[in-house]
Amino acid sequence: MTDLKKIIQNAAASHELSAEQIIAVLKDDSINDFLFSAADKVREKYVGDEVHLRGLIEFSNICKCSCKYCGIRKENTSVQRYRMTEQEILSLAQYAKEYGYKTIVLQSGEDSFFSKEKMVSIIKKIKDMGFALTLSIGEKTYEEYKAYKDAGADRYLLRIETTDKNLYQKMHPDMSFENRINCLKNLKKLGYETGTGCLVGLPEQSIESLAHDILFFKELDADMIGLGPFIPAPDTPLAEENGGTLTIALKVMALTRLLLPDINIPATTAMETLEPDGRLKALQSGANVVMPNVTDKSCKQKYTIYPGKAGLNNTPEAYKLSITSKIKSIGRKISNNYGFRNKF
Ligand code: 5AD
């Protein structure tokens, strides 16, 4: 066995890797299948064969941020903006209930219209419907995070996007890296299941910095990690740049599974966008979650964080059927429970 394979095999048992080892694995593509299969086995051992489906509602694409990579950044005037009413959000949640989803993920741009009071009202009503609830609505104050938690929110997604501070500042000219870290610490402190993750393949992003992203996930003891390839979006400053590849995104994901064996990892839409069945590949390389979009078609088409988003023409019903049969076709099951992290 080659040295790199030994490193991967050891990591599958010890869940430890040094930055140098991660870099060596990321730089060598001859061991990819070995890595994916090791991550798949760790996934099976710690979180089993069940795939958790989380119903995603993209309830507003209005955003005050200027993230250079993001298609719904505030400067992008070619986006038709929308904002759902509480009633519209709740009726989508009702559909999600009918599809059998146990979790609702509420995602939006950073839209100040949704005050603390408005969010608390929505959170309480969704919790009353019997869902686990994940929020993905950006950077807020400790007090706001606390109010959402007290209202019943269970989980929060806030990707660090990159741990390379210089790159972070270039990508987010109006934001601060320290505040992002602080938000993640606050979420942990408040007892949220905390999700983070990164973009893979940003311009000027090094392999070394990806290794540090992975070690950061471990250090934070993240409960969920969502990552995907950067896909250049039109009408953004990065429109003409190269994007990330599915392979490197899958490698970062598989390494994350080796280091954090018991967490929840989604097979992300960005992965499916780059390759048909990219999601299935992800499910066979460490992932155990899928987030079907339950947003109605006209809104979903306007939530253009990147182009060609997979599943834009699917109805939620059709998607539920197709993802269920695909998951079964690779020998996996649809989970019937809330899918919280069972910490090892
Ligand atoms: N390509 C891929 N992912 C993107 N995101 C934003 N813009 C892009 C893009 N162009 C991701 C960010 C964000 C998540 C909701 O979407 O990582 O956290």
Image (spheres, rainbow, N blue to C red):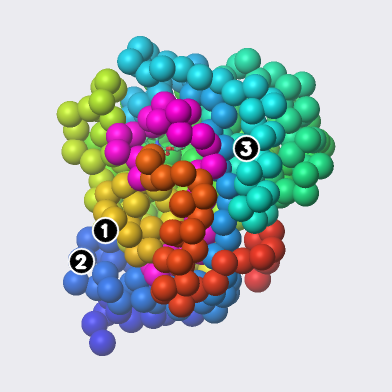
The quarter of the picture where residue 190 lies is top right
Left or right, residue 127 beside residue 95: right
Specify the quadrant that holds the N terminus. Answer: bottom left
Could you tell me how far apart the alpha carbons at marks 1 and 3 are, in whole angstroms? 34 Å
The residue positioned 68% from the left and 49% from the top of the image is 97
Place of residue 49 in the rendered image (x, y in percent of width and height, measured from the top left): 54, 74
User: What residue type is disc 2 on?
Assistant: Asp
Q: Which mark is residue 247?
A: 1
Mark 2 = which residue? 29
Could you tell me how far apart the alpha carbons at marks 3 and 2 are, in whole angstroms? 42 Å
Q: Is residue 289 magenta?
A: yes
Q: Compare marks 2 and 1 and give the one earlier in the sequence.
A: 2
Q: Is residue 75 positioned above or below 168 on the image?
A: above
Report if residue 254 is visible in the image.
Answer: no
Place of residue 24 in the rendered image (x, y in percent of width and height, measured from the top left): 27, 64
- In the picture as drawn, the residue positioned furthest to the bottom comes out as 1
The quarter of the picture where residue 118 lies is top right
Could you tell me how far apart the alpha carbons at marks 2 and 1 are, in whole angstroms? 9 Å
Q: Nearer the viewer, residue 289 or 258?
A: 289
Mark 3 = which residue? 92
